């Protein structure tokens, strides 16, 4: 007997060790073969209790029949004394079978009468604690259904390296919590706001963009209102760099003139935007990176008022009309509050791409994400300081996601800028009012 127990204990230890090794060396296959089936069975088996605990059940009248009256109490509903009677029971929402995802599972639930997706969003944290998982995200593909997307552990704690970005104006800058790539595609979402407190990962994201765009046939322009300390090392790949508000105002005037020129080119060719022009007529796209946006709007005294108004109007015009004429904005800032003036609020309305890193003041989070789901704001304010680069992202599909940028050091971005310096069109060549400039012509010029 003792010997048999010993063999059993030994076998259990070997199996546990093998499972642990499997989990360590190939987590995805371990999850699909072992973790997910166990999780799915547990979730289905405990759904009544969990739904009840999270306030997602509804009381309903039922006729109940039992041959053993006392047994009913064990179902967690009500005690029935007679064999057949009308009772009030807690009804749980109908849940489909959970489906596995890379980092957890996803399950569709039928809402009960009077429930809205917001009820499930409000219960998301309670659900996450009940299931012992990292997070539960709620979406509603159609009325009457909610999808609970569960991530078992934070997929953003460790992420891989920046992959190459072969598509024009599209850069894979990180990973979404769903495991999908986080892409910044200027042709789909032309203008972006990138907000975050100091050391939250804003510059890292700008570095990722520089590394992704440097090998592409685009002109990069830097507005570095930190006096040039951020973008000067990338100057070899920048067609123009402004390091003060006055220089920014001049560059913005150039951009507005460039836009007018491209408008004329498109009008003459009967095109609505530069992408409808023939390849050999299409002018080079321009991506403008702005660091410390608030500095463009801060007024020390009244003498600066005119300059601020000029800059603000020009930036807004670029944001309003730039998309069709191949001019894209990526604006970074620690603080993007309405106290900076109406110019910022108007600019924000034009920037449909939003990235909100960890923020100190609720107003910046509200300005960046406020017109999305309120749950996005809560998530942004919960980003811990230990995970720089984690952000709440809204873009392409109108949804918001937690995401993390790939780590891209200044040295990597600097190397990319130097390596692809030969692709930098000169600013004079970009802005010269010539019809028919192509990327190739600009490089020759
Ligand atoms: N995705 C990331 N993964 C790992 N480390 C990161 C990531 N993003 C940023 N970091 C690290 O966090 C620190 C702060 O990042 P970064 O300089 O980009 O912040 P910032 O918001 O631009 O700060 P500041 O406003 O002070 O310039 C850096 O040391 C950087 O290496």
Image: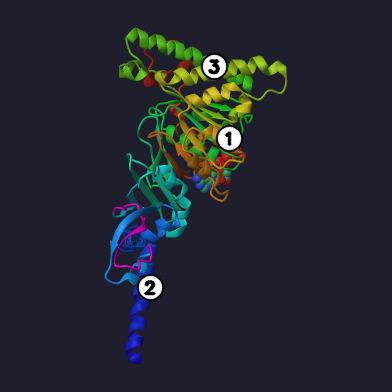
Viewer-nearest of discs 3 and 1: 1
| Position of residue 108 in the picture relative to residue 121 (left or right) | left
> Quadrant of the image for the N terminus?
bottom left
Image point (37%, 77%), residue name: 13
Q: Secondary structure at mark 1?
A: helix
Mark with earlier residue (3, 1): 3
x, y (%) of residue 88?
A: 37, 57
- Residue 387 versus residue 331 in the image, above or below: below
Q: Give x and y (percent) for residue 211.
A: 46, 36
Name the foreground residue: 435 vs 331: 331
Mark 1 — residue? 364
Q: Nearer the viewer, mark 1 or mark 2?
A: 1
Q: Is 385 left or right of 116, judged from the image as shown?
A: right
Look at the numbered disc 2 and give the secondary structure of its residue: helix
- What residue is shown with label 2? 17
The structure residue drawn at horizontal position 29% and vertical position 72%, both measured from the top left corner, is 68
Residue toward you, 37 or 444? 37
Q: Quadrant of ligand 1?
A: top right
Q: Tell me the distance, in whole angstroms, between the alpha carbons under discs 1 and 2.
A: 49 Å
**Looking at the picture, does residue 170 appear above or below residue 21?**
above
Q: Magenta residues, as a range?
A: 77-96
Residue 161: in magenta span: no
The residue under label 3 is 314
């Amino acid at each position: 007997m003792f010997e048999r127990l010993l063999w059993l204990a030994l076998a259990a230890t070997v199996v546990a060790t093998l499972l642990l090794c499997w989990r360590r060396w190939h987590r995805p296959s371990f999850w699909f073969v072992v973790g997910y089936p166990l999780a799915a069975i547990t979730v289905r088996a405990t759904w009544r209790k969990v739904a009840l605990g999270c306030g997602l059940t509804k009381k309903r009248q039922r006729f109940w029949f039992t041959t053993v009256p006392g047994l009913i109490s064990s179902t967690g509903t009500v005690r029935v004394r007679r064999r057949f009677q009308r009772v009030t029971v807690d009804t749980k929402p109908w849940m489909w079978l959970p489906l596995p995802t890379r980092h957890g599972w996803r399950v569709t639930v039928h809402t009960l009468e009077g429930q809205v997706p917001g009820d499930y969003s409000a219960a998301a944290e309670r659900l996450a604690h009940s299931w012992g998982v990292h997070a539960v995200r709620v979406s509603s593909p159609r009325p009457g259904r909610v999808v609970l997307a569960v991530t078992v552990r934070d997929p953003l704690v460790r992420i891989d390296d920046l992959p190459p970005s072969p598509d024009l104006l599209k850069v894979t800058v990180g990973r979404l919590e769903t495991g999908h790539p986080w892409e910044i595609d200027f042709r789909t979402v032309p203008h972006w706001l990138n907000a975050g407190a100091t050391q939250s990962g804003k510059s890292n994201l700008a570095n990722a963009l520089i590394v992704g765009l440097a090998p592409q046939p685009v002109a990069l322009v830097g507005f570095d209102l930190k006096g040039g300390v951020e973008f000067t090392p990338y100057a070899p790949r920048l067609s123009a760099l402004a390091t003060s508000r006055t220089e920014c105002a001049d560059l913005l005037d150039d951009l507005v003139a460039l836009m007018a020129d491209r408008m004329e080119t498109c009008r003459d060719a009967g095109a609505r935007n530069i992408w409808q022009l023939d390849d050999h007529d299409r002018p080079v796209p321009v991506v403008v990176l702005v660091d410390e946006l608030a500095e463009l709007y801060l007024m020390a005294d009244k003498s600066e008022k005119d300059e601020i108004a000029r800059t603000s109007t020009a930036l807004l015009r670029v944001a309003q009309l730039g998309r069709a004429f191949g001019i894209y904005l990526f604006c970074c800032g620690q603080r993007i509050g309405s106290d900076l003036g109406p110019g910022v609020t108007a600019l924000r309305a034009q920037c449909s791409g939003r990235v909100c890193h960890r923020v100190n003041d609720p107003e910046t989070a509200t300005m960046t994400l406020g017109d999305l789901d309120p749950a996005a704001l809560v998530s942004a304010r919960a980003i811990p300081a230990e995970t720089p680069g984690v952000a709440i992202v809204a873009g392409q599909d109108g949804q918001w996601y937690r995401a993390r940028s790939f780590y891209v050091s200044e040295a990597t971005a600097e190397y990319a800028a130097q390596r692809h310096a030969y692709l930098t069109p000169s600013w004079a060549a970009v802005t010269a009012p010539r019809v028919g400039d192509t990327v190739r012509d600009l490089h020759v010029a």
